[in-house]
Image: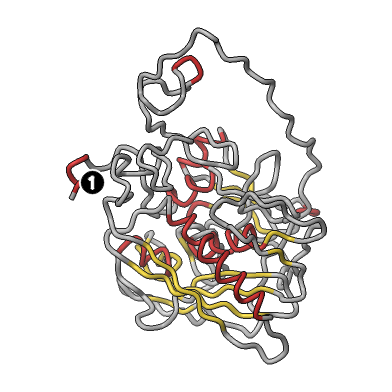
Amino acid sequence: MRIEMAITGLAAALLLGGCGSTDGIVAQPPGSTVETPVNPDPEPDPVMQPDSVEPDLEPDPVEPDSGCTADGDGDGIVDCEDEYPDTPNPNVWPDGPDRDCAADGDGDGYPDCIDECPLNPDKHSLGGEIAFTVEFLPHSRVEFTEQQREGIERCLTSAAEEWARFLRAPQDVTIEILVQPVDRIAASGTSQKQAFVYNNGSCDVFEQGAAAEIRTGIDPNGAEADAKITLNPAVSWWFDPDPLSRTAPVPEGQEDAYSILLHEMGHVLGFRWMSSLQTTWGELVDGEREDDAVGGRCYFVGESAMAIEGRPVQLSSLDCQHIRVGDENVVMGGAFWSDRQYISPLEVAMLADIGLPMRGPDDGDLYDCER
């Protein structure tokens, strides 16, 4: 079952690449923030109709060489089958249940390819830790059941931490997330404020507040919450009992809440185009926002993302903040089924392009990891 999320406020085409509407916006000095307008029912994620694609085919089985026993890098993969036989830390991002990056030398749950301290089970980052808290808000018309609240908190915390595995913070930060039930849309997610980054010569450019806190260590919200996510209790959500392993089958006719929450956290971090402000995301979006049916097209033109895709990344022109689904399994597409979605290397690259600090396998040295 695919969830169709309501689409609101779309009219004539809006040319991208400019600074957006400046009505009611005062030029912001460095370090200032702009609060995202909060409506009782925030604008939902528009969902496009994906192109029809053939199902992924299972790869042909590869028979191992019975005489291949050497494992030069000690990653548990014999050299004749190891794509990276000289290092246990291949620079390959996890992108699903069949991960190229499978080695975890210190057994801390962080694959060696993103573990900056691959030999220390007590430390996986040379920077600070990114923590998350969840708080529920009431709604005047609908409410979550106790079981839904427990499932949301469990899955949202794990989904946020999955994104954090790819991010580097200069110091410890805590991202506070508000969760509220809604009754007219399926789900939404955004940072509560936008933080000034730079002036591009024509206008000020902002980033999502949660991204600013992770990047700088400075909380643009002060004591207020950093992000807000909404979910509709009437949707047949399934809450994974073990979101760390994600191995339990999704029941037929239900939607994987973990995948939706992973998607909404992507919007909180940076997959967000705004008509009222120019953002770091908008700086790298080229084309026109318009209904796909009348020919609108918009593309993400970040250097790292295009290096992976081999071309500009096509986005849904309905909102220019969802990847147009092709044959990839991407969590930031615009449609959801009962199948799980996973963070892809492309989406990690897109966040890097808009300025989020990303972890890499070659950062730092062993001495720092031992401290």
Residue shown at the point (46%, 79%) measured from the top left: 35
- Judge left or right: residue 308 versus residue 232: left
Residue 57, by quadrant, is top right
Residue 172 rendering spot, x and y as whole percentages: 30, 65
Count of numbered circles in the view: 1
Q: Which residue is mark 1?
A: 369
Q: Nearer the viewer, residue 349 or 291?
A: 349
Q: Give the secondary structure at mark 1.
A: helix
Q: Is residue 90 above or below residue 346?
A: above
- Judge left or right: residue 199 versus residue 316: left
Q: Nearer the viewer, residue 79 or 314?
A: 79
- Judge left or right: residue 258 versus residue 203: right
Q: Is residue 53 above or below residue 353?
A: above
Residue 339 rendering spot, x and y as whole percentages: 72, 50
Residue 39 rendering spot, x and y as whole percentages: 61, 83
Residue 3, by quadrant, is bottom right
**Farthest bottom residue?**
140
Residue 226 rendering spot, x and y as whole percentages: 44, 75
Residue shown at the point (29%, 59%) measured from the top left: 128
- Quarter of the figure with the N terminus: bottom right
Residue 5, by quadrant, is bottom right
Q: Is residue 319 above or below residue 179?
A: above
Display colour scheme:
secondary structure
**Farthest top residue?**
67
Kindly identify the amino acid type of the residue bearing the numbered disc 1.
Answer: Cys
